[in-house]
Amino acid sequence: MEDVTDEGDEPSYLLHDLVDVCPDPPESRSVCDTCRRPSTVCWCPYLPVKPLAVSTTICILQHPYEESRRLKTAPMLYHGLQPGKCHIFKGKHFQPDSIPKLQEMMSDPHTLLLFPGETAEDIKKVATEGIGSETEASSPVAYNVILLDGTWLQAKALFHQNKFLHKLRRAEIRARQPSQYVIRTQPTNGSLSTLETAAIAISVLESKPDIVEVLVRPLKALCNFQMQFGAVIHHSKEYLIENGLYTKALPKSKRRRQNILRIVHDCTRKANDCS
Ligand SMILES: [Zn+2]
């Protein structure tokens, strides 16, 4: 197995970090049948009135630890899209031979693995392929998008341990935008939750910018609920490091980066003082 413990090259996009999110409020008398959350903090009313009909099919390969988390975003996507448009498979090792949907996607040339890396293309570029051609005008491409759900390290482990994923065309979201998942510390300023990642992918591939806001509403509601019960806004790990606010021990690469930033900051200050 390849080394998946290095966290020195975290990408600008994606998957969240494990941290201290606020627990559910104590007065949970009943639990919602759909989201399995206490009914006082159920996010179902914020789902689209009718599950959205999209042409993209999302497949989430979820690390088992992610499933055990109480605050997770994949179910929001599952319930926000029409049946059959979001598939969630849980585990560490996946065998496409024994998962028909995954097998089907593996043999479809329009399947993308949304996972950052040197070989990943900008999803915006993928979306523009074929535009203007006769085939495209008559039948838009219906993409399958595979996502790896877990912390960044768990997602990297899923990628390295499931070699069939390496055969897929890889794409990534390059536009950096702050996550709405403000009660969970993200590794970088541009890291996004699974829900946001999928919503942006669908909106780009189908040229439907409004779809992101609609799909992300339950996440905003969840954050608002949790903040009412005492959760606070978490800045990304990148923000904390750059501003000297990160208190935990840093890996070597991060320490080096922090030192460089400090030197640049000192030099800039001295230059300003002299002018
Ligand atoms: Zn609910």
Image (cartoon, rainbow, N blue to C red):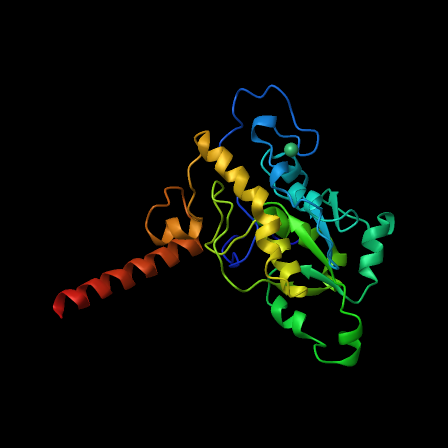
From the top left corner, tell me how far across and down residue 7 is, in percent.
Answer: 52, 52
Q: How many marks?
A: 0
Is 272 in front, or is 92?
Answer: 272
From the top left corner, tell me how far across and down residue 208 is, in percent.
Answer: 63, 62
Residue in view at x 54 percent, y 38 percent: 222
Residue 21 in view: no
Residue in view at x 69 percent, y 75 percent: 129
Q: Is residue 178 left or right of residue 274?
A: right
Q: Quadrant of residue 43?
A: top right
Is 260 in front, or is 196?
Answer: 196
Residue 246 lies, with reference to residue 27, above or below; the image says below
Is 203 in front, or is 123?
Answer: 203
Q: Is residue 172 left or right of residue 243?
A: right
Residue 107 in view: yes
Q: Is residue 266 left or right of residue 113?
A: left
From the top left corner, tell me how far across and down residue 225 is, in percent.
Answer: 50, 34
Q: Quadrant of ligand 1?
A: top right
From the top left corner, tell me how far across and down residue 118 is, in percent.
Answer: 59, 67
Is 195 in front, or is 263?
Answer: 195
Q: Quadrant of the C terminus?
A: bottom left
Residue 65 lies, with reference to residue 215, above or below; the image says above
Q: Residue furthest left?
A: 274
Residue in view at x 36 percent, y 54 percent: 242
Q: Residue furthest bottom?
A: 133
